[in-house]
Amino acid sequence: MVLPKLFSKSSSRTKPINTTTTTELPSQDSSDLRSPPASPEKQPSTSSQRSSHDKERLRSPTKSSDSTKPKYLTKSPPKSPTKSPSKSSKPTKSKRSSARYDKETTHPLNLPPELRRSALSAMSANSSEPPASDPERGQTNSPPASSAPTTPSNGYASSPFPDDRPPVPPHLHPTSPLPIHNPIDAEAHKTAGNKFFKAKEYAKAIEEYSKAIEANPQTSTYYANRAAAHMSAHQYHQALEDAKRSDELEPNNPKFLVRLARIYTGLGRPQDAIAIYDSIQPPASAKDRAPAVQMLQHLTQAESFLKDASGSMVLHALDQAERGLGFAVDKPRRWKLMRGEAYLKMGNVNSLGEAQNVAMSLLRNNNQDPEALVLRGRVLYGQGENDKAILHFRQALSCDPDYREAVRYLRMVQKLDKLKAEGNDFFKRGRYQEAVDFYSQALDVDSTNKPTNAKILQNRAMCYTKLNQAKSAIADCEKALELDPSYTKARKTLAKAYGESGDWESAVREYKSVQENNPSEPGIQRDIRNAELEMKKALRKDYYKILGVTKDASSSEIKKGYHKCSLQHHPDKNPDDENAAERFKDVNEAYETLSDPQKRARYDSGEDLIDPSEMFGGGGGFGGHPGHMNIDPSVLFNMMGGGGGGGGFGGFGGGGGGHSFGGGGSPFGGSQFGGGGGNPFGGAGGFPGAGGANGRSRSGGFPGGFQFQ
């Protein structure tokens, strides 16, 4: 009898066993999957026994109830270690591939492809056979199977499952059981946490409260206690989460709500805190509400001061509000922006630096914050870096195209730059009045930008000095210094304007102020020296004013002025005026000086006012008398007749007469050429003589001791 094939394709076949029957056995792979291996005690030991056993198994139309189950779901006995007696048969490729898999415990879907199909077919065929009658095991009988089993048209046996799928493999990792809450353990952790809280060991208290919450997460008290521990540990954000959770689990608990309001106050949210206080029944005490109410009042004052008060008042209000913040709590973003606005409102160099620090702090947290970008741009605008300011305003608009502040400042800076550039261009071209007009328009663009307006005022003052409008220049410089007291250039322009107005004393004062505030300012020593000289010149008699002429008057104009003033102030013309003689004397003195080109040059330069000791020092070092300009009567007599005395080596004429034509007598008397030391530039240096030589002496007019050969 030949069994029909159960597989359309077989991976391997076994050789027929030499028995009395000619029954063809299925492949070894299929037989292994169809029935469990025999135990070592029941396994046949000879080939004949195996053959008879196979025939008996094939003849039986029924199976036990255990054979209906998949082999990976049944607990099979251990395999026999006895090797197959057929040593001549070689293993096929399929058996080599399946050597790594245990067919008894491996689900067919987990087998390699070459074994999966055969295993599924075998399992389907195995499941389709009716169970054998086993009265001892209490199994029900089934009708006998047909001797000629039918094969489906597709070559596969029918599946026992409705959707033709094999059973799902069992879960290797079953789900964990749900935790069982133990209220006794939770209360123990809570008690331990309370002890740590009283001992101010807040970290350990938080740990115990967390364990209590883990043991029983539906108890509001545990969250409330942990919120209190977080507050004491200055962890306000964590405290806020726990306080909210406790309020969710037990709504309208006054104690929980008061704690929640205090946390809001510590975080700088007084509006939220007051809203919580208003919802508490019975109402919270005034003592509990006071910190939040005071914080809100200070913030309201700060916002009001930003509109119509100084920046320092805004800072004071913010400082008062920050006292209510929790320890180590970062200032709210809105508060930082208000502080930056206050620094900008102050407008000086130091406050601009503080505003820049605030803006950079905000941008480190969020570099796309449009308000922080505008604040940074306004700082750059105040520092005169308008190009960079425009870039920040545009970046703010890219983050928020509808941000009006960015649009307003962008347009304002662009307009101001245009007007200022026009004014600078006209100033360079010497068209000072047009420059004044454009600078005036620029000042009307933004009255709050103190540093920029100070620079524009200084530029306009320079134009006024060029237009000989000293008073207007002084007014602009004073306004610029009010906006920026450290503006050195404006103070120097003010000193110059004072000088041009004739107030040299004020000019000297301003120059010295520049020197005190900025000793390294280039040329400040020269400016002070020139201003002091001009002040001395202003204190002496003004010969030009006496003659009624200008400083650039020609010689003919000076002569006309002299004749006019002589007739006007002559004593004979004014017999009743006691001061007429003095005025007439001043007229003659002025004409005598201004009519002589050399004297006029020395007068104009102020050379006659320079103290020699202030420039070069006094007496000589090689035996001369100390150099000075004090003249006694004997020297005056010698200047008019006799020879001059010996010279010293002083700086500005030691001995000898101080006349510019020599030490000895004048050209109109005495020696013709004079004696020694007469040069105004020094006794030993210059052209000092040996002293006392007459006009024919060869040693006169040269350094002492010099002899012609």
Image (cartoon, rainbow, N blue to C red):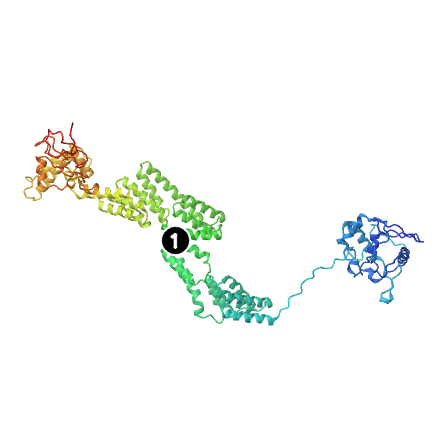
- Toward the right, the furthest residue is 20
Residue at the image point whose x is 47% and y is 48% from the top = 396
Frontmost residue, 116 versus 160: 116
- Toward the top, the furthest residue is 709
Residue 585, image x, y percentages = 10, 40
Residue at the image point whose x is 36% and y is 50% from the top = 349
Q: Residue 613's quadrant in the figure? A: top left
Question: Tag 1, which secondary structure?
Answer: helix
Residue 255, image x, y percentages = 50, 70
Q: Residue 319's quadrant in the figure? A: bottom left
Residue at the image point whose x is 25% and y is 47% from the top = 509
Which quarter shows the C terminus?
Answer: top left
Q: Which residue is mark 1?
A: 343
- Label 1 is placed on what type of residue? Tyr
Frontmost residue, 339 versus 638: 638
Residue at the image point whose x is 36% and y is 39% from the top = 422
Residue 36, image x, y percentages = 82, 58
